[in-house]
Amino acid sequence: MSHDDVTVLLADDHHLVRSGLAGLVDGAEGLRVVGQAADGAEAVERVAELEPDVVLMDLSMPVLDGVEATRRIVAARPETHVVVLTSFSDQRRVADALAAGAVGYLLKDCDPRDLVAAVRSAAQGHAPLDPRVARALLPSASTSPADGLSARERQVLRLLGQGMANKQIGRALGISERTVKVHVGHVFRQLGVSDRTSAALWGKEHLAED
């Protein structure tokens, strides 16, 4: 076990699910389960106490549901990445969880390898989304994901489309690199993409219409 291991907290009200996940995560190289929670309130407490890198969060839990627990965790400790792991892929739930600050959204019947990859990916600051969930997020004809972007985020997206790194974007807009990173993260979540290339392509196709 190394100090560089990605530390993971499991939040699910089913003991069987938690023990299955614990076996899977602990069995993966570079990942380590540091704690478990049986409801949302316990998850919030355990995150404060254990400061994990990633939380695998169920949505339907007693006491406090996963969406509200995610909101509180992200507000209290933004460096902990919450990945929702649930049976539901309907648009409203997905949107609520991502709006609460979850960086990723997986379905419980996903391939175990995808789950392990998603935990690693979230720990590196990416946004792992199950393809079936991404489809649920595709905009209906009446709204565009860009509607949820602020003017500043649109600027960031345009510069990102020009191939600029975060540092260059920060210089161009007169903001810190850290602030750029926050904007880029929100742009990714809003568009349902997980990398700069996809975001840049989306921006080139859609922002020209502004």
Image: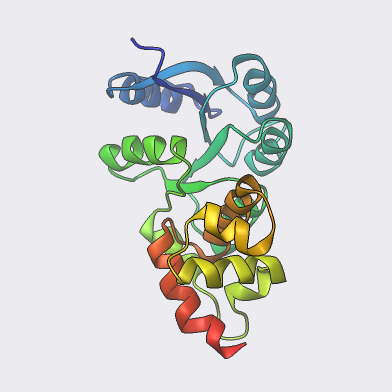
Residue 141 versus residue 121 in the image, above or below: below
Residue 135 visible in the current orientation: no
Quadrant placement of the N terminus = top left
Q: Position of residue 42 (x, y in %)?
A: 67, 22
Q: Residue at x 60, y 20 (%)?
A: 51
Q: How is the image coloured?
A: rainbow
Q: Position of residue 198 (x, y in %)?
A: 40, 66
Q: In this image, 126 relative to 37: left or right?
A: left
**Residue closer to the observer: 112 or 168:** 168
Q: Residue at x 39, y 18 (%)?
A: 4
Residue 209 visible in the current orientation: yes
Q: Position of residue 43 (x, y in %)?
A: 63, 25
Q: Residue at x 51, y 82 (%)?
A: 206
Q: Position of residue 69 (x, y in %)?
A: 68, 36
Residue 179 versus residue 203 in the image, above or below: above
**Residue closer to the observer: 148 or 132:** 148
Residue 95 versus residue 11 in the image, above or below: below
Q: How many marks?
A: 0
Quadrant placement of the C terminus = bottom right
Q: Residue at x 28, y 24 (%)?
A: 28
- Residue that lies at the very extreme toward the bottom in this rendered image: 209
**Residue closer to the observer: 144 or 86:** 144
Q: In this image, 34 relative to 23: left or right?
A: right
- Residue that lies at the very extreme toward the top in this rendered image: 1
